Image: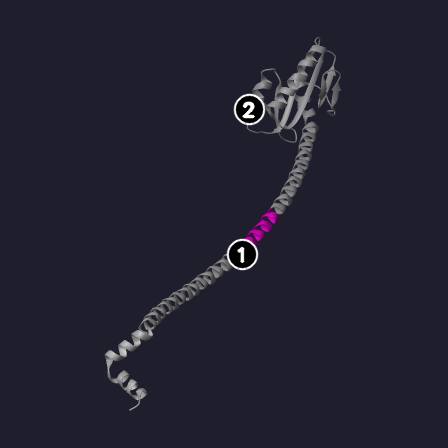
């Protein structure tokens, strides 16, 4: 048997011989190093797999966050669009309000014009029939009452002067306290200028308001004859 064949036989059959040969050749150290290397590679592989898993999870979370952010932006966009619609509606409402206010002012102006016109008609009607009462109650024959302006005094709806007697007339569609005070002030100035004359003051009105009763008290305190007109020549002297 050759040396080679004997050597191979011993390697196969003699474990001690085989171990000694491996020690001499350093194969044991190589195997140990290789085992450690394999262990390190396995650990590195596990770490890489863990990183890959974490990266996958992170990407999934980022994707979820991006989707949530996109939804949030869509909601913000929808809110902005809704706000724009609301502001447009508010702008339209303001415009409608301004138009309504303009129409209201025009209506008020129209009502005031009509009211003033009706007041003038009522007062003209009173002046037309009042001469009948003056003739019946005071004995003055007056064909028509005309507005007269007395210098330094003011205007009166009726002014009749015969000898030493003066009759002054004020006509109001509605009697208010300010009307009473204004008439009394003019009457007071007239009495100063016409101190030597007998003056009879008459105020005729048509409509009562809340303050009419107070106005009548003011007039009666200055001996003004207050007449309420009920239509045509029907006058009631308020006492």
Q: Which residues are magenta?
A: 76-93
SS class, disc 1: helix
As drawn, the label of residue 78 is 1
Indicate the quadrant where residue 128 lies. top right
Q: Please name whichever residue, 180 or 11, is drawn nearer the observer in this view of the structure.
A: 11
Horizontally, residue 7 falls left or right of residue 105, namely left
Q: Quadrant of the C terminus?
A: top right
Location of mark 2 (residue): 213
* Residue occupying the point 55% across, 51% down: 83
- Which class describes the residues within 10 Å of circle 2: few (<14), some (14-19), or many (20+)? few
Across and down, in percent, residue 119 comes to: 66, 32
Report the Cα–Cα distance between label 1 and label 2: 65 Å
Across and down, in percent, residue 71 comes to: 49, 59
* Residue occupying the point 75% across, 20% down: 149
Q: Earlier in the sequence, mark 1 or mark 2?
A: 1
Q: Quadrant of the N terminus?
A: bottom left
Across and down, in percent, residue 60 comes to: 44, 64
Horizontally, residue 120 falls left or right of residue 41, namely right
Disc 1 + disc 2, Cβ < 8 Å: no
Is residue 20 rendered magenta in the image? no
Q: Please name whichever residue, 108 or 71, is drawn nearer the observer in this view of the structure.
A: 71
């Amino acid at each position: 048997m050759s040396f080679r064949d004997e050597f191979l036989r011993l390697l196969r059959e003699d474990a001690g011989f085989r171990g000694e040969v491996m020690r001499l050749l350093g194969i044991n150290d190589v195997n140990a190093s290789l085992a450690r290397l394999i262990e390190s590679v396995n650990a590195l592989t596990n770490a890489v797999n863990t990183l890959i898993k974490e990266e996958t999870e992170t990407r999934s979370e980022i994707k979820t966050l991006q989707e949530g952010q996109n939804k949030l932006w869509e909601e913000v966009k929808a809110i902005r669009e809704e706000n724009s619609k609301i502001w447009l509606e508010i702008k339209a409402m303001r415009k409608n309000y301004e138009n309504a206010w303009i129409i209201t002012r025009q209506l008020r102006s129209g009502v005031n014009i009509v009211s003033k016109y009706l007041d003038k008609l009522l007062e003209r009607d009173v002046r037309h029939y009042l001469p009948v009462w003056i003739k019946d109650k005071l004995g003055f024959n007056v064909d028509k009452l005309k507005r007269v302006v007395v210098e330094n005094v003011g205007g009166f709806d009726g002014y009749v002067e015969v000898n030493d007697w003066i009759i002054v007339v004020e006509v109001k569609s509605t009697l208010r306290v300010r009307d009473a005070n204004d008439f009394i002030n003019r009457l007071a100035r007239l009495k100063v200028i016409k101190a030597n004359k007998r003056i009879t003051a008459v105020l005729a009105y048509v409509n009562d308001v809340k303050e009419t009763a107070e106005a009548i008290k003011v007039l009666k305190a200055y001996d003004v004859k207050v007449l309420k007109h009920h239509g045509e020549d029907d006058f009631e002297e308020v006492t």
